[in-house]
Each structure stands twice: as structure tokens, then as C-alpha cells.
Image: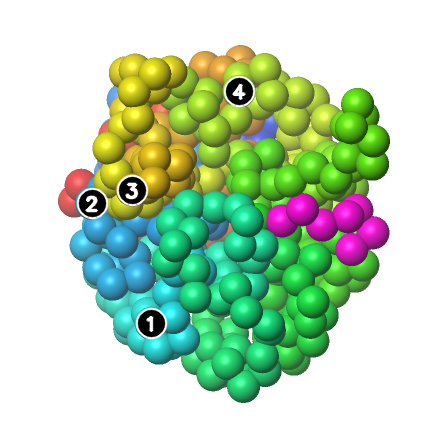
Amino acid sequence: MLAIVNAYIVKPDHIIPDGVILCRGKKIVYAGPKKPLPENCEIIDAKGNFAGPGLIDIHTHAAGSYWYYNEPEKAARITLAHGTTSVYPTLYYDLDQKQYIESAALNRKVSKKGAGRVIRGLYMEGPYLNPKFGANQSGNVWKGPIKKEEYMPIIEAAADFAQFWSVAPERPGVKGFVSDVRRANPNIVFTVAHSEAAPSDIEELIPLGLKIGTHHTNATGDRPKYPEVRGVCVDETVNSRDEIYAEIISDSKGIHVDPYMQRLILKIKGKDKIILISDACVFDGPVPGEGYEGVTDINFDWDGQIAGSKLTLDVACRNFMMHTGSSICDVFRFASLNPARAMGDLSRGHISEGADADMIIVDGFMKVKKVILQGELQKI
Ligand SMILES: [Zn+2]
């Protein structure tokens, strides 16, 4: 049995001071006020820090200097050391068919042991997005018509392991693709990404499992009917529809999403529908000059475009606290409970009896002190 003592236990809407958490095997068996410990416990002293659920990063392409698509084991070690105990490596539209298939197989293999166990599935950010938006556009090999014979091998290789699949609803033929993905995995969560679809085209996919607005307000278009008037497009649909979760990339300078916009989205979507993501990449293009001075956690591609971040999710939580005044309970909700709920998974994302023993101990500003994965204290 593993016991965490002397912790402020972070619940979704309150804190238990001087709490004790007991784990048996991979499950939490007690989380509550201090009480006498069973004999022969392995004791972890939280030293008055906060104990919250392990973070869940549903959307990241990389960690540190490693891409998940080709070096998932090395990436996973960095992800785990930063307190993320569930990650969904994100495969981008710059992979071709063969690379998608190989990368799905590699990630599946790595997910079975060691730090690789943080890999719980895939987030397929492609192939059928709107080629007008996003980084590394020159690497997009999926600009032509949607063809069943091209996508079926990818679905066969990845659909049972994938948890999230992004589409641009305006692409002709996307509905046939969505149906084929659903046939292979009825639990898949679709996201609207890199898109300038009309609200009606997005809303048509909600009954088919569309639940997430990918990096909300980034790589989305506008549809003005009159030049002087703002149109309604992806951002408005994500803001308007309560069923849809909004992913946010919260970098330290508020460049992906202005701090004012982060507060506005929080106000509109409410605490149950925000998901923080890192969307880390390793394009490593040079930082363009003006306006980007001192930027440390943004990634640029070789065309000088913003191309995801250099964030880990613990840092994204800290940034979101800074930009929005959110509490530690709130950021654990946005980076753990809400992503689990978006997948319909009630066993993760919270510290309670019966939940998975994936936990982290952090200080008051989300600096990670200890990581427990599947009931085992990790060396970080
Ligand atoms: Zn993207």
C-alpha cells in the first residue's frame, strides 16, 4: 500500500487540508482527512504541497526536443517528468499515409511499458483539415480530394488506438470519412480543427461525436457576409454550443490566445468546458523579430509562422492561472478532469476512492515535485 500524507488534496471544487491518500495497486482506496495509516505502507510526505490528479494532455506533438511521431519513448519520459500521466500523441497532417501507419504502430508498442505507459491513445490532427490554416503548410500532402482508398489504411491502423480525430467540416467528402472512422471506433471524439466551416456544417457533426474545438481561436477562419461585419464561423460555434469543449494553448506571453481572450473564453464556456493543451512541437524555426522579444515557449516553423508551443502542461496551467486568476482547483479541472470527461472516462482526472492512482504533488504554482503513475512513485 502507498500512502501520501501531509497533502492539500485538490478536489474539483474544494481542498482537503492535511489529507491522506491511500493506494492499493493501481487504484486509490482512500482520499480524505488525516487518519491512522495501515501497517507497512510506503509513505510519501507531500510536505504541505498540493496533491492533484495526474495531468492529461490530449493534444501534443512533442516533448522537449522529441517528436512523438518518431521518438515517443524519449518524449514520454519528459512528459511524465512534468506531471502528465496521460498523453495523446498528436499526429499532424504533414505525415503521409505510410508515416501515419508506422507512427501509430510505434506509439502503440511504446505505450506498453515504462514511461511510455503515459501514452493512452492518439490524437489525429489530420489528414483532412483546411490547407489554408496551420503550420508547415508546405508539408501538407493531403490537399487533394478525400479518397477512401487513401484513408482506409490509416483508419485500419489507428482507429482503435485513436481517441480524438480532427476534421475541417467544410472539406467535400468529410462526412463519409467521419462515418468510416466511427464504424471502426464508435467512441472516437471528433474535433473541429484548422477550419473556416459555417456553424451549420459543424453542428451537423455534433450528433456524430464532434465535441472539441481544437486550439480554440487558433487556425480558424472568419466568414464575413459584408465587409464591415464580423462573420460567424468556427470560434463562434465553439463559443455558442455547450456540448463543445474549447482547447486553449496558454503560453506565458498570451500569444496563442491573448490573456483577455482567455478570460473571455473562460467566461463564455465556463469551468466545465475548458481543456488546457500544450500542443508542443519541434519545428525549431527562428524566432521572428518584432513583437516576439523574450518569447520562450512558442514554436515557429521555417516560414516564420507560429507552430504550436514549447510548453509542457504544468507550465500551461501556471500560465493560465497567471492570465485568468484561476485557482489550483480550476487548473486541475482544465488539465485533468475535463479532458477525461470529454472522453467519457470517469476513472481519471480526480482524486477519489476508486479512481486511478495517477497523481502529482505540486507547489501552489504548479511546480511538479513528485509523480505517481499507476500507483508507483516515479523517478523524475
Ligand atoms: Zn493545429
Task: Write the start and end of the magenta stretch as one range.
Answer: 195-201
- Extreme left residue here? 379
Answer above or below: position of 317 versus 176.
Answer: above
* Ligand 1 has an atom within 8 Å of the beta carbon of the residue at disc 1: no
Query: Residue 302 shows which numbered tag?
Result: 3
Residue 196 highlighted magenta (yes or no): yes
Q: Earlier in the sequence, mark 1 or mark 4?
A: 1
Q: Nearer the viewer, mark 3 or mark 2?
A: 3
Q: Nearer the viewer, residue 307 or 63?
A: 307
Position in image of residue 97 (x %, y %): 40, 75
**CA distance for labels 2 and 4:** 26 Å
Do labels 3 and 1 touch, CB within 8 Å? no
**Disc on the earlier residue, 3 or 2:** 2
Of labels 3 and 4, earlier in sequence is: 4
**Disc 2 designates what residue?**
65
Where in the figure is residue 233, as x and y percent of width and height? 74, 41
Marks 1, 2: nearer the viewer: 1
Q: Which residue position holds label 4?
A: 258
